[in-house]
Amino acid sequence: MRVVVVLLFWLVGLVAAAAEPCPGNPDALGTSRVLSISPSDFTRIGSMQYAKTLPLNDHEVVITFDDGPIPPYTNAVLDTLASQCVKATYFLVGEMAQAYPSIVRRIYNSGHTIGTHSQNHPFAFQRLTTAKFERQVDAGIASVDTALGDQKAVAPFFRIPGLGRTNAIEDYLASKSLVTWSADVVADDWKRIGAREIVRRAMRRLKARGRGILLLHDIHPATVTALPMLLKELKDRGYHVVQVVADVERPESVPEPVASPDAKEPWPRALQASTTQGTPDKVATRHRVKKAISRKRRRPAMATLREPNYGATAKDWWHKQF
Ligand SMILES: [Zn+2]
């Protein structure tokens, strides 16, 4: 009898761990299962801040990306995820979605989950007035809705910028039936660390917890460089990727924009690249993103994937928040 029970557990484990085949990459990490959650059951999740988190099995990881989209980094992250058939959850910033709607649609049509992360990612979200944080939440969702062209495509998932929670903010999110996502594990990829260190920290912290929601940012070059290494480490160490969706009706895909504003308009399609090859950028990423958005009429150069040198002129505050 005991042998039968052990065998059954082994078989169940095998089925749970077996990812869908990944075309062109038989060794892909893949996505082992989809976890569908109800907002009423999961009001707030993430052990960094809350008592409750997602019901993950040992060695299961949920990969999340905040703050995008921004080319070319978001595109590079999507390419890497596609090559490994890994599905992630994105928390998009409204103004970035307005600027790059075709990337937002690409994220959705690649099968990833899209939640929101406010309209402008204000610093010290926890210090905003009630009217301001409500507007940030609502406008962020509206912008991503518009970018996708179908409000059912946006998951009722929200991550508070900088994880700057207050009871009032959480109550407001709950009143809108939004799941407030914190995280279980961070990799410090918004700090001045290189790609290898991002991977080391992510793996060390995942190992300590055994499973969890991993918070990353698809706007940093170091994260783009780290991701292929990170996915390989996850595979080599026996981790399984879980995609999270809300148990609500959603479209299979959204139409590609006929004339995408980010293709037609001279929106900055990239962070400003250094004008002199080999000269280190002296402006921090966040500052560059803001600058890019403010220069709507200027056609920019495509940014390189070179890691910027966060020099003395960099605005450190960006690196102190999520
Ligand atoms: Zn953020």
Image (tube, rainbow, N blue to C red):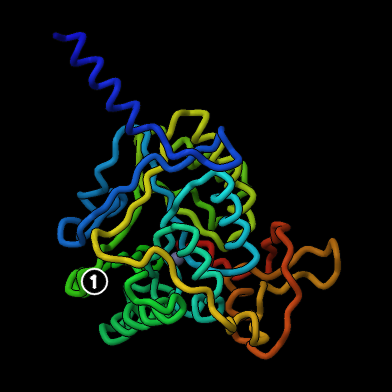
Q: Position of residue 46 (x, y in %)?
A: 29, 52
Q: At 27% from the left edge and 63% from the top edge, which residue is drawn?
A: 180
User: Does residue 122 sit above or below 6 in this rendering?
Assistant: below
Q: At 66% from the left edge and 80% from the top edge, which residue is drawn?
A: 268
- Side of 86 relative to 79 (left or right): left
Label 1 sits on what residue type? Leu
Q: Quadrant of ligand 1?
A: bottom left
User: Does residue 272 sit above or below 211 in this rendering?
Assistant: below
Residue at disc 1, CB closer than 8 Å to ligand 1: no
Q: Position of residue 132 (x, y in %)?
A: 32, 85
Q: Position of residue 157 (x, y in %)?
A: 31, 64
- Side of 191 relative to 112 (left or right): right
Q: At 39% from the left edge and 68% from the top edge, which residue is drawn?
A: 161
Q: Quadrant of the N terminus?
A: top left
- Side of 36 relative to 320 (left or right): left
Q: On the image, which quarter does residue 158 sit in?
A: bottom left
Label count reads 1
- How packed is label 1: few (under 14 Cα within 10 Å), some, or many (20 or more)? many
Q: At 60% from the left edge and 41% from the top edge, which residue is drawn?
A: 24
Q: Mark 1 sits on what residue? A: 173
Q: Position of residue 144 (x, y in %)?
A: 42, 76
The secondary element bearing badge 1 is classed as helix
Q: Quadrant of the C terminus?
A: bottom left
Q: Nearer the viewer, residue 138 or 250?
A: 250
Q: Nearer the viewer, residue 280 or 78?
A: 78
Q: Is residue 184 visible?
A: yes
- Side of 48 relative to 31 (left or right): left
Q: On the image, which quarter does residue 276 sit in?
A: bottom right
